[in-house]
Structures are given as C-alpha cells and as structure tokens.
Amino acid sequence: MTAPASADAQQGAVLSPDDVRTLTEEVWSTFLGHTAPFTAAEARAFTPTWAASVTVKGEWNGMVSMQLTGVGAHRLTCGMLGMDPESDEPSEADVVDAVGELVNMVGGNVKSLVPGPSQLSLPLVATGQFAHGSDQQEIVRLDFAWGDEPVSLTVHSGSPAVSKVNR
Amino acid sequence: MKILVVDDSRVMRQIVIRTLRQSGYAGHDVVEAENGLRAVEMVATEKPDLVLSDWNMPEMNGIDALAHLRASGSEVPFGFVTSEGSEEMRARAAAAGALFLIAKPFTPELFDEALSAVLPRA
C-alpha cells in the first residue's frame, strides 16, 4: 500500500509558478496594459511600501500576497482609475482599494487552480509587508518589472496560525 | 434602461462602468451599490433592468443578495462579475438564478457577449 503524500507536498504540488505568472500577467495586461510593460524579472531586493493579500481556506489553504513600492502603488491606482500618474493624486483609500482589487483578482484565479471547495477572503492591504509564520510555506515567488518598478508576488500554502486556532 | 453595478471596490465599479461604455452600453443609466445588502435595497428603490454584481463582498455577498432577491419575488436579470470563475462557482451562480458569470479580468468583448441577450446596445 502506498503511503499517502504528506499534506505539505499536496499543498505545494497543485500550483505551478508558470500558471501563476500567466494569470498575473493577464490581470496586469487587461487593466494596466496601457501603462508600462510588465515582464518577468530577476529577483530584486526592495523594501515594499504596500502589500496586499488574500487567503484561500478550505480543501486547499494558502495566501496570495503582492508587494510593491509607493510609486508602483500610485501608478497602479492611476492606471486602474484612468488617472494621469504625473498630475493626479489618488487618495489613500483609492490606493488601498486598487492594490486590494489587484491581489483579489490574482487570488480568485489562483483559487480556481487549486482543489476546492474553498473560500476566498476579502483582500487585506497594509503598508509594509506581511510576515508569514512557520506553518506557511512559500511555494511560488514571482518577480516582475513594471516599467522601472519592482513588483513581487508570492503564494504561501498552509493555514495562518490564527485560523488553526479556530479549527 | 438602468444597470445596478455592485462591488465593494470603488475602483472596480469604475472599471465595470468604463467597460460597459467600451462594449457599447454607454447610453444606459448606471447606479452603484457597495455590497449585497445595499444592492437588495436598491433593486427595490431603483428598479434596475440588470444587476451586475461582485461575489465576495462585506455585509452581504453577491450570492446571498441574489437569493434574497429571488426569495422576495424579484426576477431582475442578475449577472456576476467576479474574480472567481471556476466551474463550481459558475454552477452555483446558475443554480441561484444568475444569467451569467463574467470572470475578472474581463474584456469589453466578454461583456458584450454576456449582456447582448439582456440589454439593447445603447
């Protein structure tokens, strides 16, 4: 009798980085294709000013997070709202909204790729970056260059500690 | 005719409204709601001819809003515009009485494909 694969292995095996890259590029090109080229890039160290995440809970548990600079978040917001990034100044509420919606779209598409049923959370947006506990394992990390701005996207599998308490 | 656009993201409501224009439906009136609860209220007061709703929202999500509408006797045409386009979600949407589910990211062509059977171009 074959031993069942470990839960960790099952969590990690379901997602291919190429699939996540393709869907992220599709989201970007649809809503921000008129701005600057968005291309896969070498990992580049940067201190994110904004981070957004959504979690998937259910048959598959994980978190999709996006990190970007202040300039990147500003341009993203202007691009989605049809504003001029050189002269317009979106409100902080609009930045939170736009960055959250971007990660929500990527997360919703990731949810479609992993085993269900599961629930997608509302997006959580923060200044800085999210820390991940030892119960969460990074299974995908993608780095992009959007014009001159770095954007990184990560997928962690495993439940956040808080949801484990609630089980 | 009147379209009710429901999404907790103001940015996404703007994008949906822009896409309606780009897909040939610029002449219809548009009203907005930020969650399912508000949408249920506005269907009663605004009497839209079509509801375009996100799924995942605070206060009341889109599928619960649709269930409330149908339970109260409303037959308003209802379609989802959501980031979750799996077969499971499409089946749940159809079973609840939704006419279509447009997955984000979407194009004006996809909007026209879904809306042309419900609304005249204007």
Image (spheres, helix red, strand yellow):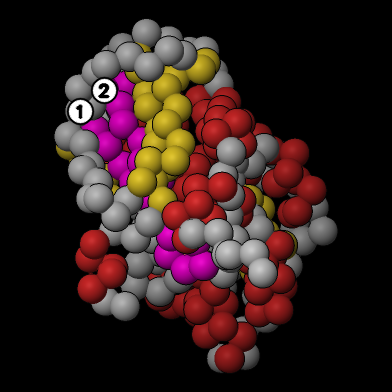
Q: Is residue A149 visible?
A: yes
Q: Does A152 appear above or below B53? A: above
Percent across and percent down for residue B24 are 72, 40
Q: Mark 2: give few (<14), some (14-19) or many (20+) Cα within 10 Å.
A: many
Q: Nearer the viewer, residue A101 or B28?
A: A101
- Please say if A103 is above or below A67: below
Q: Is residue B32 left or right of residue A29?
A: left
* Residue denoted by label 1: A49
Residue A154: x %, y % from top left: 39, 37
| Residue at (64, 41) in percent of width and height | B106
Residue sitting at x 79%, y 48%: B113
Q: Are marks 2 and 1 in contact (CB under 8 Å)?
A: yes
Amino acid marked by disc 1: Thr
| Residue B42 placement, left or right of B81 | left
Whether residue A146 appears in this view of the structure is no
Q: Identify the image quadrant of residue A142.
A: top left
Under circle 2, the secondary element is loop
Outermost residue, right side: B117
Magenta stretch: give its range: A50-73
**What mark, if any, has residue A69 been given in the picture?**
2
In reply to whether residue A57 is colored magenta, the answer given is yes
Residue ID at (25%, 50%) = A134
Q: What distance separates the C-alpha of mark 2 from that of mark 1? A: 5 Å
Q: x, y percentage for residue A15?
A: 56, 44
**The disc numbered 2 marks a residue on which chain?**
A
Looking at the rendered structure, whether the residues under marks 2 and 1 are on a common chain is answered as: yes
- Give x and y (percent) for residue B77: 68, 70
Q: Secondary structure at mark 1?
A: loop
Residue A149 located within the stretch drawn in magenta:
no
**Looking at this rendering, what residue extends furthest in the left direction?**
A128
